[in-house]
Image (spheres, rainbow, N blue to C red):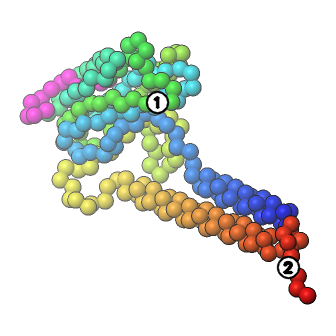
């Protein structure tokens, strides 16, 4: 009976291992990259955003972040919030024709924002940092692609500059993307990311279903172990004492 109990335990481990493999097989690992949060806003508005920068190196710290504003979507006003241990520099460029900001025409717009770490304030391995900005007025375009360069303390540079391809897979080094909706869009109207949200919901449902499967297999395994233990206790050949009657 001891051999039978070990067989049940081994089967339990194999079953749980197989289910776990199936679970992790369904979930593709998410790549950590520079992103903007929130990722959606309304055209014409001013908004507070944060560029979120994870450190992907095991040995080096991130010491510089360069954000390039899209040339086809000019922004007249960019304000930065202090980030302890970091300095910031804002570079402008000239546009023709000028853009309207609060009813006034301006020819100088923001082209690039650079944050540089001082001393040991860099983003250490296994951590991330957010760099807040106020942007506006947001242009009348469907999306803004902010190409980014991430520099490490060992001299390495990661170029997050790949633009999204409609209907395609996520590029290897995606640039942060801000989706813009038309001003006055009625509440509840489908947004450009609605399809992606539906896909996320489907993925969540699949995940919950697989989790239920894991729980079910676990219950069967525990039931099998309990049944095995009951048989062992009832079997007089398994070390127990048999009761005889004359």
Q: Which mark is residue 127?
A: 1
Where residue 215 sits in the image (x, y, percent)? 59, 64
Q: Residues within 10 Å of mark 2 (few under 14, many from 20)?
A: few
Left or right of residue 208, residue 89 in this image: left
Residue 237 magenta = no
The image quarter in which residue 4 lies: bottom right
Which numbered circle lies on residue 173? none
Seen from the viewer's position, the closer of residues 139 and 16 is: 16
In percent of the image, x 41 and y 11: which residue is there? 119
Residue ranking furthest to the right: 246
Q: Pointer 2 and pointer 1: residues touching (CB < 8 Å)?
A: no
Is 103 part of what is drawn in magenta? Answer: yes
Q: Quadrant of the C terminus?
A: bottom right
- Dot 2: element: loop
Region rendered in magenta? 101-112
Q: Mark 2 — residue?
A: 243
Q: Residue furthest bottom?
A: 246
Q: Is residue 224 visible?
A: no
Q: Nearer the viewer, mark 2 or mark 1?
A: 2
Camera sees residue 190: yes
Task: Give the residue displayed 20% in from the left and 35% down from the top.
Answer: 136
Q: Secondary structure at mark 1?
A: loop
């Amino acid at each position: 009976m001891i051999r039978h109990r070990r067989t049940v335990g081994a089967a339990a481990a194999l079953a749980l291992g197989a289910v776990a493999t199936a679970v992790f097989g369904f979930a593709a690992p998410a790549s950590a990259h520079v992103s903007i949060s929130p990722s959606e806003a309304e055209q014409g508005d001013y908004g507070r955003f944060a560029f979120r920068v994870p450190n992907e190196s095991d040995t080096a710290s991130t010491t510089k972040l360069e954000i390039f504003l899209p040339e086809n979507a000019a922004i007249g006003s960019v304000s930065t919030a202090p980030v302890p241990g970091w300095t910031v520099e804002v570079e402008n460029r000239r546009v023709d024709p000028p853009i309207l900001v609060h009813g006034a025409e301006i020819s100088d717009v923001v082209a690039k924002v650079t944050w540089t770490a001082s001393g040991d304030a860099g983003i250490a391995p296994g951590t991330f940092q957010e760099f807040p900005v106020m942007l506006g007025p947001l242009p009348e375009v469907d999306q803004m692609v902010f190409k980014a360069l991430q520099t490490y303390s060992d001299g390495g540079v990661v170029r997050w500059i790949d633009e999204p391809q409609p209907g395609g897979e996520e590029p290897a080094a995606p640039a942060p993307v801000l989706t813009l909706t038309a001003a006055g869009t009625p509440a509840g109207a489908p947004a450009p990311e609605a399809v992606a949200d539906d896909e996320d919901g489907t993925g969540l449902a699949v995940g919950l279903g697989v989790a239920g499967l894991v729980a079910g297999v676990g219950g069967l395994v525990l039931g099998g172990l309990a049944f095995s233990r009951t048989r062992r206790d009832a079997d007089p050949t398994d070390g127990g004492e048999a009761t005889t009657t004359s």
